Amino acid sequence: MRRNRRRLTLAVPLAGAVALSLTGCSTSQLHGFLPGFIDGQKPVTNHTQTVSDLWVGSWIVLLAVGVLTWGLILWAAIVYRRRRGQTGLPVQLRYNMPIEVFYTLVPLILVLGLFAFTSRDQNQIEHRFAKPDVVIDAYGKQWAWDFEYQTQGVYTQGVQARPVSEGTGNTGFVESQIPQLVLPMGKKVEIRLRTRDVNHSFWVIDFLYKKDMIAGQTNYEDVIPTRLGTYQGRCAELCGEYHSRMLFTVKVVSPADYLTYTDSLRAEGNVGSIANLNKDGPGTQNPAEPTGSEANPR
């Protein structure tokens, strides 16, 4: 009875200390130090919190399993250690059915649970909008990006990474030439991901999400941007010599500023479809590329 009281007396302050330490954590710490979170502000997209919850929750479960395993190892090493004066082998047991059942069922439950939560969150993230407000085609190419704003009928084309000047050995973009994708905050955006040559991967770091661009295939990323700002993006699939220079930025703006931006592209003459243009720019055709009028199966 006294032992139980002592344990309870120790457990209450310990639980209080843990709770107090958690309340002192910053937003970044509470989200596992993942990008995309700022104190006092919304997550970057409607999916960012879901990804963070799965990540942090998985680590909590794994840490609990690790602590339990380490504790059992230390306990067995201390309690069953060979003491001074002992000789011979300890009593040998052939099996212990309850322990064997426990060590079979618990890992199975953990794996099935992780699979269930992952499947649930993946289905939510991969769900496509029935009626997106904005449809954008993103084309990866060695080594830059083209963005076609289908809903507004305008586009931008990126400049390939290449030596800044012959003989210097330096490569990459001039800063102002890094392609930029502009998205309206609070709108349902569908990004259709395609490649003009080899396989690439569309990765916006703060979105906590990346998706492959497979040759001859169209993939989709449906998202609602929820926080204004400029975010870094890059190719996450090794795609050739200047892969590390295949960069872009995503700028989330208000719906009014988004329309202003697309109107500026229209004023510059960037009107129409670039679906059939190859990576070298206007005037050349890439017959392997799907057309802009391709059906969008759902």
Image (tube, rainbow, N blue to C red):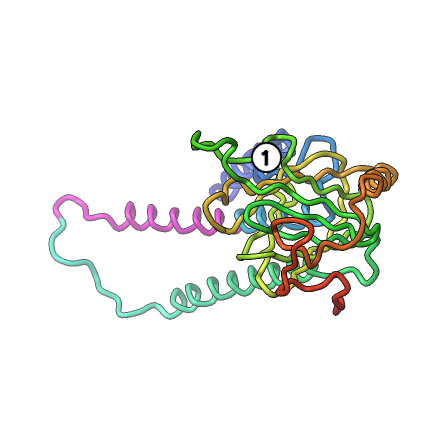
Q: Residue at x 62, y 41 (%)?
A: 159
Q: Residue 107 appears at what percent x and percent y?
A: 46, 62
- Residue at horizontal 78 percent and vertical 50 percent from the top: 149
Residue placed most toward the observer, 193 or 119? 193
Q: Nearer the viewer, residue 238 or 121?
A: 238
Q: In this view, does 114 lie to the left or right of 131?
A: left
Specify start and end residues of the magenta stretch as a single range. 61-85
* Residue 112 figure quarter: bottom right
List x then y, in percent, for residue 69.
40, 51
Query: Which residue reaches farthest right?
Result: 256
Question: For the residue carrying disc 1, how many other residues have a C-alpha within 10 Å: few (<14), some (14-19), or many (20+)?
Answer: few
Where residue 181 sits, quadrant-wise, is top right
Say if 147 sits above or below 127 in the image.
above
Q: For residue 116: magenta?
A: no
- Residue 73 appears at what percent x and percent y? 34, 50
Q: Nearer the viewer, residue 152 or 134?
A: 152
Three-letter amino acid code of the residue under disc 1: Gln
Asked if 129 appears above or below 265 in the picture, the reply is: below
Relative horizontal placement of residue 239, taking residue 93 as reference (left or right): right
SS for dot 1: helix
Residue 150 as seen in the image, left or right of residue 23? right
Q: Does the magenta stretch include residue 80?
A: yes
Residue at 26% across, 51% down: 80
**According to the image, label 1 marks what residue?**
29
Position of residue 285 in the picture relative to residue 90 (left or right): right
Q: Main secondary structure of the magenta part?
A: helix
**Which quarter of the image is occupied by the C terminus?**
bottom right
